[in-house]
Image: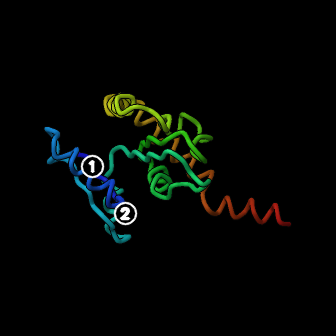
C-alpha cells in the first residue's frame, strides 16, 4: 500500500485524489491528513520505504526524512538542498525534475533489491548517529568557543 503521511495542500490533495481514483490500485492509497505525534510515530515505524520529494528548498531539512533516516528506513529524496550532499549510500536520490517513470523505476528498484534496502538502512543509521542534534550542538559550541 501507499500512505501519504501528513497534510497535503487542498488543491494538490484534490488533484491527487482524482488521479488515484482512476488507478487500479486506488484503494491501496491512504491520505492520513494531519497526525498527532503518537500516530505519526506509529505510522512511520510501520514504513518499509520512505519517499520525500521536493522541487526546491529554503535550506531546511525535512523532519520526516530525518525521522526515517534515524529509524533506518530506506529513503528516496529529491537531490535538492541539504539532501543533495548526503552520500548516495545513505539515501536514494532522484532529480527534482525527474519524470514519474523515473521515480517509479527508482522505487521499484528499491522494492525489488533487499540488499540495497538493507545497505541503505545500515548507512542511514550510521549517518544519523554522526549528525544528530547532540553532535550539531557540540560543533556549534566548539565553533563559538
Horizontal arrangement in the rendering, residue 12 relative to residue 77 (left or right): left
| Residue that sits furthest to the front in the current view | 11
The furthest residue to the right: 145
Q: Pick the residue in front: 40 or 17.
A: 17
Quarter of the picture containing the N terminus is top left
Query: Which is more N-terminal, label 2 or label 1?
Result: 1
In the image, residue 47 above or below residue 100 = below
Disc on res. 41: 2
Label 1, label 2: how far apart the Cα atoms are:
24 Å
Q: Position of residue 17 (x, y in %)?
A: 22, 51
Residue placed at 57% from the left, 45% from the top? 83
Element at label 2: helix
Query: Secondary structure beneath disc 1?
Result: helix
Q: In the image shown, does 45 or 35 lie closer to the viewer? A: 35
Q: Is residue 50 above or below residue 9?
A: above
Q: Residue at x 32, y 33 (%)?
A: 111
In contact (CB < 8 Å): disc 1 and disc 2: no
- Residue 76 drawn at (x, y percent): 44, 40
Reply above or below: 49 against 108: below
The nearer-to-camera label among 1 and 2 is 1
Give the vertical position of 110 relative to 26 (above or below): above
- Residue of label 1: 16
**Residue 25 x %, y %:** 16, 41
Quadrant placement of the C terminus: bottom right
Q: Position of residue 144 (x, y in %)?
A: 83, 66
Pick the front one: 30 or 44? 30
Residue at 22% over, 44% down: 19
Display coloring: rainbow
Q: Residue at x 43, y 43 (%)?
A: 75
Front-most of 3 and 23? 23
- Image-based side of 1 in relation to 142, left or right: left
Amino acid at each position: 500500500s501507499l500512505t501519504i503521511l501528513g497534510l497535503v495542500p487542498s488543491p494538490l490533495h484534490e488533484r491527487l485524489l482524482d488521479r488515484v481514483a482512476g488507478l487500479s490500485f486506488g484503494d491501496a492509497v491512504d491520505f492520513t491528513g494531519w497526525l498527532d505525534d503518537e500516530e505519526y510515530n506509529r505510522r512511520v515505524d510501520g514504513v518499509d520505504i520512505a519517499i520525500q520529494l521536493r522541487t526546491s528548498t529554503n535550506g531546511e531539512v525535512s523532519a520526516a526524512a530525518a525521522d526515517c533516516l534515524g529509524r533506518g528506513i530506506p529513503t528516496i529524496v529529491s537531490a535538492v538542498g541539504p539532501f543533495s550532499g548526503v552520500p548516495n549510500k545513505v539515501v536514494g536520490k532522484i532529480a527534482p525534475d525527474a519524470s514519474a517513470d523515473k521515480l517509479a523505476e527508482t522505487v521499484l528498484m528499491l522494492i525489488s533489491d533487499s540488499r540495497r534496502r538493507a545497505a541503505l538502512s545500515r548507512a542511514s543509521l550510521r549517518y544519523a548517529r554522526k549528525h544528530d542534534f547532540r553532535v550539531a550542538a557540540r560543533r556549534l559550541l566548539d565553533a563559538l568557543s
